[in-house]
Amino acid sequence: MEKIYQMEYRGLNLFDEISTVELAIDEEKQTIHIYDIGQVVSPIFNFDVSAYELSDGFYKMADILRHKKILTNEQAGSDLTLSEWLIKNNAYFYIPNKRIKKYVQASIVEIVDRTMEQALFDEYVQRV
């Protein structure tokens, strides 16, 4: 049985206002599901390379999760760097305008067909 636990993260959005992000963490699948209405940690589009990239807000949140040993199966004595933590884990971003983006293996892709993606968190899919 899957063990998914939920928490909230607060950070500054694009307008420098404090916003809340909902997180659902699936330790078994090494995946974090992020419901982000306020665009605090959502990927941003880089026009120079015509691709999405992780935002500064996401890096800050990921670093906090890493320090709290969330999504790490490592022994207490060995610390992962932020880069190692990001490579090891996956993230799904549930964003307004009915968009879902997936971060896996250091790249971000938009999920067009939700039926083909088995790892989505149903509670967030229904709200997008």
Image (cartoon, helix red, strand yellow):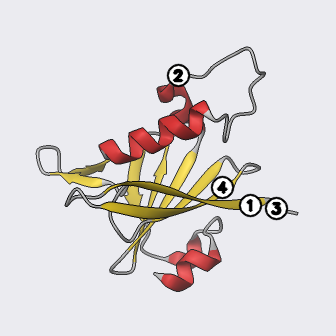
Q: Which of label 3 and label 1 is nearer to you? A: 1
The answer to which image quadrant residue 17 occupies is bottom left
Determine whether 120 is above or below 81 in the image.
below
Q: Which of label 4 and label 3 is nearer to you? A: 4
Tell me which label, 1 or 2, sits earlier in the chain: 1
Tell me which label, 4 or 3, sits earlier in the chain: 3
Judge from the rendering whether residue 47 lies leftward or rightward of residue 78; answer left or right: left
Q: Residue furthest right?
A: 1
Q: Residue furthest front?
A: 18
Q: Residues within 10 Å of mark 1 (few under 14, many from 20)?
A: some
Which residue corresponds to mark 2?
A: 81
Judge from the rendering whether residue 114 lies leftward or rightward of residue 19; answer left or right: right
Determine whether 10 is above or below 114 in the image.
above
Which residue corresponds to mark 1?
A: 4
- Mark 4 to mark 1 CA distance (whole Å): 5 Å
Q: Amino acid at mark 1?
A: Ile
* Callout 3 secondary element: loop
Q: Amino acid at mark 2?
A: Thr
Which residue corresponds to mark 4?
A: 25
